[in-house]
């Protein structure tokens, strides 16, 4: 994964090194509507194999999203947001 990875919110620990999943945290800014966020995440699920693990909505309207997918033998690519 690239340097775009950010620190996970408190309580979002994602298992140990033997886990079968890889995770990527994303931050969606407040100007991204719920419908747009839903469509972006659906596209990542369809073409990138990612699934939604957690979402946290903040008072300012921003969202922190945690995506996961099963680890594969091929190198991982991050969702393009």
Image: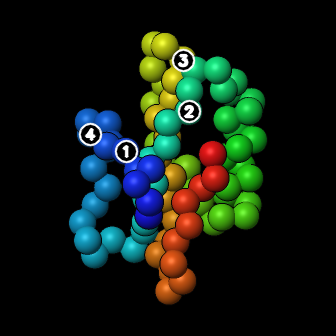
Which callout, 3 or 4, points at the residue further toward the start of the chain? Answer: 4
Q: Are marks 3 and 1 in contact (CB under 8 Å)?
A: no
Residue at the extreme bottom of the image, as rendered: 73
Relative to 69, is 80 on the left or the right? right
Mark 1–mark 2 distance (CA, rounded to whole Å): 12 Å
Side of 24 relative to 40 (left or right):
left
> In the image, what residue occupies the spot 52% across and 23% down?
62
- Residue 28, label in figure: 2
> Quick check: marks 1 and 2 in contact, CB under 8 Å?
no
Left-right relation of 66 to 43? left
> Marks 4/1: CA distance?
14 Å
User: What residue is shown at x 71% (from left), y 44% (from top)?
Assistant: 40
Label for residue 11? 4
> Is label 3 or label 4 in front?
3
Q: Earlier in the sequence, mark 4 or mark 1?
A: 1
Question: Which of labels 4 and 1 is toward the front?
Answer: 1
Q: Which residue is mark 3?
A: 61
Q: Earlier in the sequence, mark 2 or mark 4?
A: 4
Which is closer to the viewer, label 2 or label 4?
Answer: 2
Secondary element at image label 4: loop
Image position, residue 65 (x, y; %): 49, 40
Q: Of helix, strand and loop, which one carries label 2?
A: strand
Q: Residues within 10 Å of mark 3 (few under 14, many from 20)?
A: some
> Comparing marks 3 and 1, which lies closer to the viewer?
1
For marks 3 and 1 on the same chain, the one whose residue lies earlier in the sequence:
1
Circles 4 and 1, Cβ within 8 Å, touching? The answer is no
Alpha carbon of mark 3 to alpha carbon of mark 4: how far?
20 Å
Q: Secondary structure at mark 1?
A: loop
Q: CA distance from mark 2 to mark 3?
A: 9 Å
* Rendered position, 47 above or below 63: below
Based on the displayed image, in which of its 4 quarters is residue 29 positioned? Answer: top right
In the picture shown, does residue 33 fall above or below 66? above
């Amino acid at each position: 994964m690239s340097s775009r990875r950010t620190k996970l919110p408190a309580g979002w620990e994602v298992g140990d090194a033997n886990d079968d999943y890889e995770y990527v945290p994303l931050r969606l800014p407040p100007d991204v509507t719920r419908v747009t966020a839903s469509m972006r995440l659906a596209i990542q699920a369809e073409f990138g194999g990612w699934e939604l693990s957690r979402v946290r909505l903040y008072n300012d309207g921003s969202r922190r999203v945690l995506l996961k997918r099963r680890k594969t033998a091929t190198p991982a690519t991050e969702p393009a947001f």
